Image (tube, grey):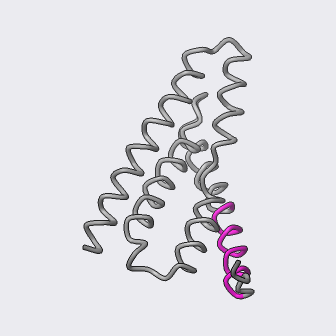
Amino acid sequence: MNAVDPLAFLLLLAAGALGAGSRYVVDTLVQRVWMRTFPLGILLVNVTGSFLLGLLTGAALALDDSLVAIVGVGFLGAYTTFSTVSVETMLFAERGRWRLALGNVVGTLLAAVAAAGAGLLLGMLLTA
């Protein structure tokens, strides 16, 4: 087992803080403009984060492993949020808003997977 590089670990922590802060800012700004029931801010966060993680993964062979971990696990891991989608979906269901619940979970999953695939393809093309 490899020892954890202290500098890489500190950078990962800092990237995580930036990712969590970025998620909060994006969600807050989008919801302030959107002002609707559907959580468009979190959808945007998860789709853009999935695209960026796909891009990073596609380009990973050309990048330093520490950088991939810092950006992928640190920033993007903290930026995206499956738990918020899960809770918002359950709250919609609890309130009997089944269309919003279904739209949230299915829409997020389909859009995020499509974005990850597009990012992966682009990352592979850029480093080929």
Residue at the image point whose x is 43% and y is 35% from the top: 110
Picture quadrant of residue 52: bottom left
Residue at the image point whose x is 56% and y is 30% from the top: 105
Q: Position of residue 11 (x, y in %)?
A: 67, 80
Q: Position of residue 6 (x, y in %)?
A: 75, 86
Viewer-closest of 77 and 96: 77
| Residue 18 belongs to the span the image colors magenta | yes
Residue at the image point whose x is 51% and y is 36% from the top: 108
Viewer-closest of 4 and 52: 4
Name the quadrant of the N terminus. bottom right
The furthest residue to the front: 1
Judge whether 119 appears above or below 111 on screen. Answer: below
Q: State left or right for residue 23 relative to residue 48.
A: right
Residue at the image point whose x is 48% and y is 52% from the top: 50
Q: Position of residue 39 (x, y in %)?
A: 59, 36
Query: Total marks drawn?
Result: 0
Judge whether 96 appears above or below 49 on screen. Answer: above
**Which secondary structure dominates the residues rendered in magenta?**
helix
Q: State left or right for residue 3 relative to residue 117.
A: right
Judge whether 105 appears above or below 68 on screen. Answer: above
Picture quadrant of residue 97: top right
Viewer-closest of 9 and 88: 9
Q: State left or right for residue 67 relative to residue 91.
A: left
Residue range corresponding to the magenta coloring: 7-20
Name the quadrant of the C terminus. bottom left
Viewer-closest of 105 and 23: 105
| Residue 67 belongs to the span the image colors magenta | no
